[in-house]
Amino acid sequence: MHSVGKSWLLLTGFVLFYIIYLLFGALVFSSIERPVEDKLRHDMEALKQQFLNQSCVNAASLELFLVKVLSANKYGVSVLRNSSGASNWDLTSSMFFANTLVTTVGYGHTTPLSDTGKAFSILYALIGVPFTMLVLTACVQRLMYPLVLAPVGLLQRSGMEPRPATIVHFVLLLVLVVLCFFIAPAAVFSAVELSWSFLDGIYFCFISLCTIGLGDFVPGTQPGQRNKQLYQVSVMVYLFVGLMMMYLLLRTFHKMADLHGLTTFLQLPRCEESEQDDDREPIMENKYEDQASPYVTEKAASKPLEPGSQPSYNTINKG
C-alpha cells in the first residue's frame, strides 16, 4: 500500500479509536454514576418535602437544609428541578463529560459522585489525555501543507517576499479561526442558549478553546433543552476541531517566529527541532515529502533531500 494511503488509514484509525474510547468512557461513567445520581435526587426530594412539612423553621434547620442543597447542586442535582428530570449521566451527557476530561477543558459542572467514578476518571484521563494530544498532533500534521505551507508558497509565487508572505498568511489564518471558531459559534450559542448573550458566547468559546474551562457557562444544561443529545454531540465536535485549529495556529506562529528570528532572539527551541529529532520520524507521513517545498531557494534545492525531509518554514531564504 502506498505510504499516503497508509498515512490516511492510520489517521482514520486514530480518530475511530478516539470515538470508541469516548463511547467506552461514557458507558462506564453512566453505569457507575447514574444510580448514585438517582439516589441523590431521591434524597433531595425527600429532604425538600421534610423541610416543607416543618411547622416551625429555625435557623439551624434552615442552615442544614441549605448546606445539603448546595452540596447536591455542586454535583449537578438541584432541588429546583423534579427528581425525574434529565439526568447528568445519560449516555450523551457522560460522553460529553468524557470529552471534556480527555481534552483537559473540564468545565466542572458535572463531577463524579462516587469514589469508583473518581478512581476511573484518573485512569481514564491517564490514557485519554496523551492519546487525545496524539490524535490532535496527527490531524494538525495532515493540515500543515494545505492550510499553511501551500498558501505561503502561493503568496511567494505571486511576488511577495518570504517574510511578508508568512505575516500575511498568519493574519489571514487568524481571521479565519476567529470568524469560524469564535464569532460564528458565539452567534449559535447565544441563539440556542436563551440566557446567553453574544458576549457570553465569545467568552465560552475562548475559555473552552484555551482549555481553561471555568465552568460558569456550560452548553446544554438548562432545563427543557431541545435536542439536547444532538446539541451535546455538536459541541463535542466543535471542541475537537476548535482545539485542532488552535494548535495549528500556534504551530504556524512558531514557524513564523523561527523565520523572523524571534525564537533565536529569545533562545527558544525552533519549531522543527521541537517536533523532530534526527532519530525520530513524524507521527503522520507527509504525502509531499518527496516534493521540494515552494519556499526552497535555488541553493537549498540543489542539495539532496535528507530522509524524512518535508516542507517547512526553515527552508525559506532569510536574507
Image (cartoon, grey):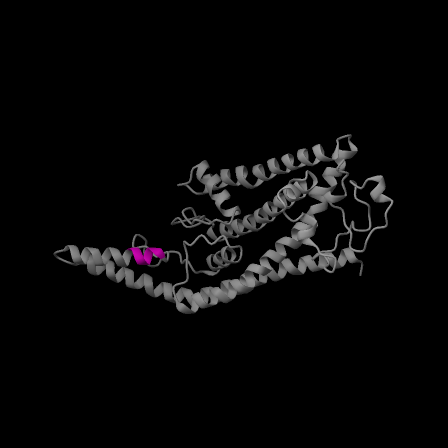
Query: For the view shown, which residue lies furthest in the right direction?
Result: 302
Camera-nearest residue between 318 and 3: 318
State which region is magenta.
Answer: 70-74
Quadrant of the frame with the C terminus = top right
Horizontal relation, residue 115 to residue 25: left or right: left
**141 drawn magenta:** no
As drawn, 157 above or below 228: above
Camera-nearest residue between 83 and 178: 178
Query: For the view shown, which residue lies furthest in the left direction?
Result: 56
Residue 285 occupies which quadrant of the picture? bottom right
As drawn, 159 above or below 118: above
Q: Where in the figure is residue 88, as x and y percent of width and height?
A: 41, 58
Q: Residue at x 57, y 38 (%)?
A: 178
Camera-nearest residue between 246 and 309: 309
Q: Where in the figure is residue 3, as x and y percent of width and height?
A: 78, 58
Q: Where in the figure is residue 142, as x and y percent of width and height?
A: 70, 50
Q: Where in the figure is residue 303, as x and y percent of width and height?
A: 86, 47
Q: Residue at x 77, y 43 (%)?
A: 315
Horizontal relation, residue 33 to residue 19: left or right: left
Camera-nearest residue between 106 and 190: 106
Horizontal relation, residue 195 to residue 303: left or right: left
**71 drawn magenta:** yes
